Image (cartoon, rainbow, N blue to C red):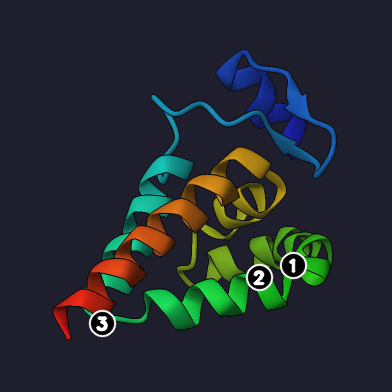
C-alpha cells in the first residue's frame, strides 16, 4: 500500500518507518503543520512545560510509540484519524522534535513570565 503512494508522489519511501517520504507540498497534514498545531494548542492551554517534560521523560519510548502509530494508522483512518502516519514520521524525525522542543521551551518561558 505504501509503495503505491510512493509511486504516486514520485518520492523514495522512508525505509526507517515504512512510510513514503514526506512531501510538504502535497501531504494532507504535513509535519510542519502538525508541529505548529501542537505548539499552538500548548500555548493556548498553557501546557508547554508539562508537554515538554512529557516528551523528555518518554524519549526512550519514542520508537515504540512511532511504530505503534504506523500499525494503528490503517484502522484509525477508518475512524477518521487520518494524521497518525504524520505523527509517526514526526516521532522519527530528530529535527522536527528539536524544533518542537525549542518552541515549547520558548512558550514555557513566556507562560512563566505572563503568570
* Circle 2 residues within 10 Å: few <14, some 14–19, many ≥20: few
Residues marked 1 and 2 touching at CB (< 8 Å): yes
Q: Residue furthest top?
A: 10
Could you say where residue 49 lies in the image, as x and y percent from the top left?
Answer: 43, 78
Q: Is 55 placed above or below 25 here?
A: below
In the image, residue 25 above or below residue 34: above
Q: In which quadrant of the rendered view does residue 42 lie?
A: bottom left
Identify the residue shown where x is 57% and y is 56%.
87
Quadrant for the N terminus in the image: top right
Q: Secondary structure at mark 1?
A: helix
- Left or right, 74 with reference to 48: right
According to the image, label 3 marks what residue? 45
* Disc 2 element: helix
Report, in whole angstroms, how far the alpha carbon at label 1 lies from the one at label 2.
Answer: 5 Å
3D distance between C-alphas at marks 2 and 3 = 19 Å
Q: Which mark is residue 59?
A: 1
Q: Give how far across and how far down residue 112 sits, in percent.
A: 27, 79
* 22 or 58: nearer the viewer: 58
Amino acid at each position: 500500500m505504501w509503495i503505491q503512494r510512493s509511486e504516486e508522489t514520485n518520492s523514495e519511501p522512508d525505509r526507517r518507518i515504512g512510510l513514503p517520504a514526506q512531501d510538504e507540498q502535497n501531504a494532507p497534514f504535513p509535519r510542519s503543520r502538525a508541529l505548529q498545531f501542537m505548539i499552538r494548542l500548548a500555548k493556548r492551554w498553557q501546557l508547554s512545560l508539562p508537554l515538554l517534560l512529557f516528551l523528555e521523560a518518554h524519549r526512550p519510548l519514542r520508537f515504540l510509540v512511532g511504530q505503534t502509530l504506523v500499525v494503528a494508522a490503517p484502522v484509525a483512518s477508518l475512524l477518521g484519524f487520518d494524521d497518525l502516519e504524520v505523527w509517526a514520521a514526526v516521532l522519527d524525525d530528530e529535527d522536527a522534535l528539536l524544533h518542537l522542543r525549542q518552541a515549547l521551551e520558548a512558550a514555557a518561558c513566556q507562560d512563566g513570565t505572563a503568570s
